[in-house]
Amino acid sequence: MNRYLKLVHMEVHRFRWVLAALMAITAICQISALIVTVLTELSRREERLSQNIGNSSAPVPAKDPLTFEWVMMITQQWFSLPILLSIAVLGLYAFIIWYRDWIGRSTFIYRLLMLPAARSNIYFAKITAFLLFVFGLVSFQLVLLPIEQLIFKLVLPADLRADSHIVEVISINQALAMLIPRGFEQFLYSYGLGTIAILTIFTAVLLERSYRRLGILYGLLYLGACGLAVVFPILFLGVGTPGSSFFPEEIFVIVLVMCALVSCVSVWLGMRLLAGKITV
Amino acid sequence: MIEVQDIRKRYRRRDVLNGVSFNADKGEITCLIGVNGAGKSTILKAVMGLTPIAGGSIRIDGQAPGPKLYERIAFVPDRLTMPTGMKLAEALRFMEDFYESWNSERASELMRFFGLSYSDRVGSLSKGTAAKFNLLLGLGQDSDYLLMDEPFSGIDLFSREAIMEVFTSELIEGRGVLFTTHEIGEIEHLIDKAVLLQDGKVSRAFDCEEMRSGEGKSVIDVMREVYRA
Amino acid sequence: MNTSGGWKEILFNNRDPVYLQVVRHFKERIATGQLLPGQVIPSRRELGGLMKINPNTVQKAYKEMEEQRLIITEGNSPSKVTNDTELLNQIRSELLGEAVHAFVASVRKIDVPIDELLLLVKRTYEEAPEA
C-alpha cells in the first residue's frame, strides 16, 4: 500500500508541470476572454450612449443588465478551447504515461519492474495518477468558475449586471456541461465509461509493449473487441431494433455487465502482461 | 547461486538464445563474453525477469525471478533507470523508499568516491558519470548478487578506472557478480569465471585460474580458439 | 601506509595463474629484502585494490603462501612475513636457481665454452650498475 502511494506520488510529480501549464492556460484563456468581452461591451455601450443612437440589432439592449450567463454565451469558444486542449493532452498522456518509461535516454521501466513490490502496483499507480489528473483539472475548473464570476462582478459596475446561478452558467457552455454533469448518475456514467476506456488503452499499450510489432495488432484488436462488447447490446439488441425482445432496462443491465466485464478483463490482462510477458 | 538452465528466446525470427546454461556462484565474479548481439544483455534481463523466455528455467538460490528477489539481486543496465528530470538526491531517496536492502551510508560514500553531485539532474549526466551513477544504484543495495551489463564499454578512461577499482574492492566482496562484456582486455585479471557465448549457446565456461594452470591459456587465448575457429 | 609502496608496478602475464604470480612477486620481494622477516604485509583487501585483481585471487595467493609457510596469520591479526631463516634462504636459492636455469637454457643454444661464459658473466656482473 505504502509503495503504491509512493508510486502514485511519483507519477503525479512527473506530470506536475504539464498539469500546472494546463491549469494556467485554462485560467488565462477564460479570464482574459471574460474581461475582454465585458470591457468591449461596456465601451460599445458608452459609444452608443454618446452617439445616442439606439441600434435595434444589438444583441443586448443598452439598458439591459449584463449577466454572467451572457458572457459565457459570448465567450463559448474561449472557455471550451482550454478544456478541449486539456482533454487532448490527457488523451495523449494515456499512452505517454507508459511510453515515457521506455523511450528516451532514461528507461525508468527497468527500475519500475525491478522494484521489490508486486508489479500490479505500477498499473494501479498509473491509473490512479491519471484519474487524479482528470479530477484535478475538473475541480480546478469548478473552482475557477466562482472566481471568474467574482472577476465579472469586479469588472462590471453593479447597476449594469444581474446575478445568475452557477448551475445555469455551466449548462450554457457545452464543453462545461459535458465536463460537469448536472446529475450524479450522469457523472457516474461519463466518468465510469472514461475510466473503462483508459483501462482498455492501458492494456492495449501493455500488449504492444509485450509483443511489440505483433502487439500493435493485438492492441488494436483488443480495443476493437472491448468497444464492440460495450456497444453491441445497444446496436443489435437495442430499442428500436426490429424483433428486439429486450426491454430498455434489460439492455441497460447488459451494457453495465459488459462494462464491468471489459474493465475486469483489462485489469486482469494488464496484470498478467506486467508480471510475465512485459519486455524492456 | 544463479542457475541458468537451457534458456531459449527468439527475437525477430532469430534464435537469440538457443539453450543457454551456466551457473554463477556467490562470492565469484563471472563474466559473460560474446560479440555484440550474442544475447548477453538478454540473458541478464531474463535473469532479472525483465523479459520473458521461451523455454528453460532460471533459479536464484532455488527461487524463480520475482519481486521478492529484487531485494537480493541488483541489476546495473547499460542505460539510465531513473527519470531524466530527477535530481540525483531524489533518485537516491527513491531507492531508499523502495528497497529495504538500500544502504544509504554506502550510497553517500560512493557519491563521494565517484565525485557525483546531489543537485545534478539524471538527464544531465555525461556517459561516464551516468555509468558511475548506475553502478552506485546497484552497489547501494546490500544485495547477494550484482548483475552488470557492459560496465566498461563506451565510457572514458577515468570512469573505467574508477569502476575497475570498485571491482577490486570490498564493495563486491562476498557478492556474486555476473557481468557482460564484448572485450576482455584490461579486465582479464578481475574475473574468476568466464562464460563464452556463441550462436545463442555457451561454447566454453571455465575457471580462469584453472585454465591458466591447467592449459597455460589466458582468457583471450580461449576466446581466440572459440571465435576464430 | 608503509606497506603499500611498490605494489602497483607488478605486470601480470595472462597465461600463468595470477595467484601464483602474486606468490612469486612476494618471494622476489623477500629475496631482495624489500620485505623483511616478520614485516606486516598488506591486508587482502588492500592488496586487491593495489594490484587491481579481485579479492578471490588475493585470497588464493595468501592461502598458497600460508601453505608454503611464507606468511603467518595468527587469529585476527594482520599477516606477517615468516621469521624462519631456513625458509627464507630456501626462497632465495629457489629464485636464484630458477634464474640460472633460464639463463643456462638460453645460452646453451649458443655453443660457448664454460670458461669463456663464466668470464663474460663475471665481467658483465661487475660492470653493470647496481640495481
Image (cartoon, rainbow, N blue to C red):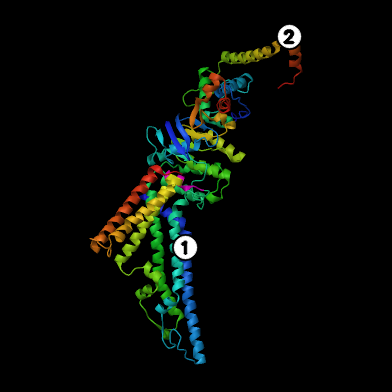
> The C terminus of chain B is located in which quarter?
top right
Residue type indicated by callout 1: Ala
Q: Which residue is mark 2?
A: C111
Which chain is disc 2 placed on?
A: C
Q: Residue at x 54, y 30 (%)?
A: B190
In the displayed structure image, the side of residue B218 where residue B54 appears, left or right: left
* Label 1, residues with CA under 10 Å away: few <14, some 14-19, many ≥20: few
Q: Where's residue A120, x and y in %? A: 37, 48
Judging depth in this view, the residue of B220 and A215 nearest the camera is A215
The answer to whether tags 2 and 1 share a subunit is: no
Judge whether residue A112 is colored magenta: yes
Which chain is disc 1 placed on?
A: A
Q: Where's residue A159, x and y in %? A: 42, 86
Of the numbered discs in the image, which one, if any, rests on residue A190?
Answer: none
Q: Where's residue B127, x and y in %? A: 57, 44
Magenta-tinted stretch: A106-115
Residue type indicated by callout 2: Asp
Judging depth in this view, the residue of B13 and B35 nearest the camera is B13
Q: Where's residue A93, x and y in %? A: 45, 57
In the displayed structure image, the side of residue A226 where residue C106 appears, left or right: right
Image: B146 above or below C104: below
